[in-house]
Image: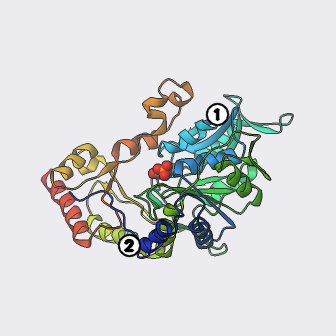
Amino acid sequence: MIPVNAPLLAKNTLRYVSDCVRTGWISSAGSYIGKFEASFAEYLGVEHAVTTTSGTTALHLALAAMAIGRGDEVVIPAQTMIAVPYAVLYTGAKPVILDVDRETYNLDPDRVAEFLKRGCRYDKRAKALLNRKTGRRVRALLPVHLYGHPCAMDELLSLAGEFGLPVIEDAAEAHGAIYRPDGRKAPRFCGAMGTIGCFSFYANKIITTGEGGMIVTDDDALAERARRLKDLAHAPGRRFLHTELAFNYRMTNVQAAIGLAQVEEIDRFIALKRRMAEAYGRRLGRIPGLSLPVEKSWARSVYWMYAVVVEDEFGMSRDDLMARLKERGVDTRTFFIPVHRQPVFAKDSDYAEADCPVSDDLGRRGFYLPSGLALKPAQIRAVAQAVRDIRADC
Ligand SMILES: Cc1ncc(COP(=O)(O)O)c(C=O)c1O
């Protein structure tokens, strides 16, 4: 079976990990934590990077550091991974689920504009932007750079500025993806444009620590707050005295050692992903009814997964195509089930009312092909041939 993903470990992994084991620094207290944070911050061009135990806890920590909680709402896309609404709910806040763009699969700025302009009102007494329907305070935008393609950040940042909202970027799938809006503005990395960026280092990500996550920010106070909250919030100058509720989201030195080796090779990994996308694009480009991932003129995608959409014209449903590919030894995965369709939220009317036809359609038609960093050119050719053969048969 050609797997959907297999990780590639970097050259210095064993050396750095052995160093942790040899010296006994296996908890979160070792020196690789600082080195990994510093190297990733330098790569992205941000002031601070704070490691966590996962992308999910990075999102939770970012929201908690911004004091988002009960009575608040956070705008998220409907087409995303469940960790996004979960993290919002962990804080006591509620997600506002908006639809995505059909081409990039990312949060649609038009939907965000419509929600903020028509669905909200500014309450002068409360000094807060309130959702007209629920009465809750709208506290942040949380766009997700899905499958490695940047969101339309200029539009989202300008709306955020207009309504005084911070932006929490979920770049869990977009390490090294670049947003270059136009000739006048310098290109920026995904995760480094908003108030806080969140990353996952799960084994299938562009760079990995096995499990792990990171938040990045230029805001000194937010970084300091996140560092406290991720480590049980010991009182300043008085260890084991605790004046507020906090978490243990500490990454281990061993994970950070793996991560440091990965950052050293991140550009090679991105080049591999882009070569994979180019090879798939060349071989699948003219198949009627198969929509391939776009790369907007303002974007450098890192093609975390090669995500395609099966249109009616293909002559077979997405699920049938995936089943036929499996028979031929090709493993695939569907797009995410849209957030408002998740059974875990079925009883909550806020979700049932979400109107997100594009996310629904993508959830039915989208899937991704094997896209791991360890994928060989011959495997890419075999996958593309399998898709072509199946299409020719139907
Ligand atoms: C968009 C997105 N956000 C958050 C996460 C959560 O990351 P983790 O699995 O490291 O908790 C993922 C994981 O794949 C993701 O794809």
Q: Position of residue 225 (x, y in %)?
A: 73, 52
- Residue 141 visible to the viewer: no
Whole-angstrom CA distance, mark 1 to mark 2, is: 40 Å
At horizontal 54% and vertical 25% (from top left) the residue drawn is 349
**Rendered position, 71 above or below 274:** above
Residue receiving disc 1: 92
- Residue 377 visible to the viewer: yes
Q: Residues within 10 Å of mark 2 (few under 14, many from 20)?
A: many
**Which numbered marker is on residue 272?**
2
277 and 69: which is toward the camera: 69
Q: Earlier in the sequence, mark 1 or mark 2?
A: 1
At horizontal 59% and vertical 37% (from top left) the residue drawn is 90
Q: Position of residue 228 (x, y in %)?
A: 70, 51
Q: Which element is circle 2 on? A: helix
Q: Residues within 10 Å of mark 1 (few under 14, many from 20)?
A: some
**Which numbered marker is on residue 81?**
none
At horizontal 53% and vertical 31% (from top left) the residue drawn is 351
**Rendered position, 100 above or below 283:** above
Q: What's under tag 1, amino acid-wise?
A: Gly
145 and 260: which is toward the camera: 260
Q: Position of residue 232 (x, y in %)?
A: 67, 46
Q: Position of residue 62 (x, y in %)?
A: 64, 50
Which numbered disc, 1 or 2, marks the residue closer to the eye?
Answer: 1
Where's the N terminus, which quadrant? bottom left
Q: Which element is circle 1 on? A: loop
Residue 38 location, quadrant: bottom right
Relative side of 237 to 333, left or right: right
Relative side of 81 to 379, left or right: right
